[in-house]
Image: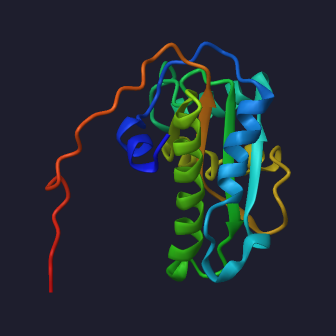
Amino acid sequence: MEVLKAMKTRKSVRSYIGSLSDDALQTVLAAGQAAPIGMGKYDAMHMTVIKDSALLNELDKNAGAFFGDPARHPLYGAPCLILISTPIPDPAAGNVAFSNAAVMTQNMTLAATDIGIGSCLIWGAVAALNTNQELVAKLNLPEGHTVCCGIVIGETTEDFTERDIPADRISVSYI
């Protein structure tokens, strides 16, 4: 698939059938590995792959409670959550760390789309996770790491249809 076609086909998938092959997972992880990282500090980035259903349920419940709606399921029943973490020594200058994590997840969503696997960027459940240090401890993150964002992936019955993207959807200034 061409990159622009993958971009026009990618969407946030919120319904999963509960499975994910190891080959698909490895393809998505390889896309994360291919992301450009500021100053080439690849050793500062970390991916945590969570397939344990009990931990996924705990993370999902934590996020639902965080949003004030225990019936809400912010992980959408996906069989896999990949969290991106990195040290953020200076929160005022954390834009590089968060940008690195965002680029990694974008690469992974495009790779998932390319192989017909559903994906959805996860931000709110990560914010919820970071308020629960007991739950963060279960992730065994490298020392000093903070979870920046994540992606859920899995097989889905949803179709991936290329759509038109309006050229003026986001404003542009020319100087």
- In the image, taking residue 2 as reference, residue 141 lies left or right, namely right
Q: Which residue is outermost to the front? A: 2
Q: In this orientation, which residue lies closer to the viewer: 120 or 115?
A: 115
Q: Residue at x 44, y 41 (%)?
A: 6
Q: Nearer the viewer, residue 145 or 79?
A: 79
Residue occupying image coordinates x 35% and y 26%: 161
Q: How is the image coloured?
A: rainbow
Q: Residue at x 46, y 28 (%)?
A: 13
Residue at position x 73%, y 65% in the image: 45
Location of residue 160 by image quarter: top left
Compare residues 94 and 70 and report the one nearer the observer: 94
Residue extending furthest bottom?
175
Give the number of marks: 0
Q: In which quarter of the image is residue 53?
A: top right
Q: Is residue 93 above or below residue 172?
A: below
Q: Quadrant of the C terminus?
A: bottom left
Q: As drawn, is 22 to the left or to the right of 161? A: right
> Residue 4, position in %: x, y?
39, 49
- Relative to 108, does residue 75 appear above or below in the rendering? above
Name the spot of residue 137 as percent of width and height, x first. Answer: 81, 49
Instruction: Tell whether 50 sits left or right of 68.
Output: right
Position of 107 with respect to 42 (left or right) is: left
29 relative to 61, above or below: below
Question: Residue 163 location in percent, x, y?
Answer: 27, 34
> Where residue 98 appears, x then y in whole percent?
55, 66
